[in-house]
Image (spheres, rainbow, N blue to C red):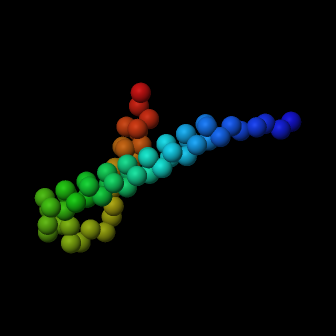
Amino acid sequence: MRRRVSIRPMWRHLVRGLILIGACVGGSARCYVEWAGANPADAKDVECWDWSVPHQWYDAAHRR
């Protein structure tokens, strides 16, 4: 059996994904800039990235 996928839900899903990607990247970059400004000595040797920030943005976007 063949199902038809309507365009509207697919478009809504795509737009929501793009917004979440933008929020994750923008939020992470902003948090890093703030942290680097507060810790100039540590910001030079940053080797590990805090991956909890994108997850926090994702969780915040899916709360209702």
Residue, far right: 1
Give the x, y percent position of residue 52. 36, 49
Give the x, y percent position of residue 20. 44, 46
Quarter of the view holding residue 58: top left
Residue placed most toward the observer, 1 or 53: 1
Give the x, y percent position of residue 4. 76, 37
* For residue 60, side relative to residue 36 (left or right): right
Give the x, y percent position of residue 21. 44, 51
Residue 51 appears in the figure: no
Q: Is residue 55 above or below residue 29?
A: above
Q: Is residue 60 above or below residue 46?
A: above
Q: Is residue 40 above or below residue 50?
A: below
Residue placed most toward the observer, 64 or 39: 64
Residue for point 33% across, 64% down? 48
Residue for point 44% across, 35% down? 62
Residue 22 appears in the figure: yes
